[in-house]
Amino acid sequence: MNNIKLIELISHGDNRGSLIALEKEHNVPFDIKRVYYIYDTKRGVPRGFHAHEDLEQMLICVSGSCKIKVDNGKEQEVYELNTPEQALYIGKMIWREMYDFSQGCVLMVIASQYYNPKEYIRDYNKFIEIVNGGG
Ligand code: TYD
């Protein structure tokens, strides 16, 4: 799907353990303005259900696993994130839903813009209208 990419991250491991670095331009394809993480997630409780007109994100499940459903208004795909060595890049105008969080899951999100609740598209019908050139 356009605007969605699974990125393999290079892990620097040695006998002490592993380390992954995220750097603008090297493995993060945008200017990093914000990082947040979702943790202490409750079993069976989904999150997300929104899209953004002008926000790019990278999602990394640094611990545990979860599923991400992405939808560009025409097609839908589901990704399972279950390793800190992969990131899911989500570009602009993608509806996303996160669910099936494992116990202890920590989902880290790197974003290209500061938090702005006003730019959220939280109504799926409105999202469809915008991707089809209306709205
Ligand atoms: P919410 O958008 O509901 O989370 P999700 O995308 O997982 O469904 O955000 C949960 C709360 O956190 C809500 O009160 C807004 C706040 N929040 C911030 O203050 N800053 C942020 O960067 C984000 C993403 C959320």
Image (cartoon, grey):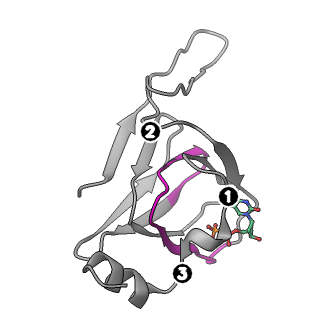
Q: Nearer the viewer, residue 45 or 112?
A: 112
Residue 106, compared with residue 13, is above or below; it is below
* Ligand 1 closer than 8 Å to label 1 CB: yes
Q: Residue furthest bottom?
A: 125
- The stretch in magenta equals 43-66
Label 1, label 3: how many angstroms apart (C-alpha)?
Answer: 15 Å
The residue carrying mark 1 is: 115
Measured as percent of width and height from the top left, residue 63 is found at: 63, 45
Identify residue for label 3: 122
Report the disc number at residue 92.
none
Q: CA distance from mark 2 to mark 3?
A: 27 Å
* Residue contact between numbered discs 2 and 3, judged by CB atoms under 8 Å: no
64 magenta-colored? yes
Q: Amino acid at mark 3?
A: Arg
Q: In the rendered view, would you say 25 is above or below 109?
A: above
| Residue at the image position 51 percent from the left and 28 percent from the top | 24
Binning the other alpha carbons within 10 Å of mark 2 as few (below 14), some (14 to 19) or many (20 upward) gives some
Q: Which mark is residue 86?
A: 2
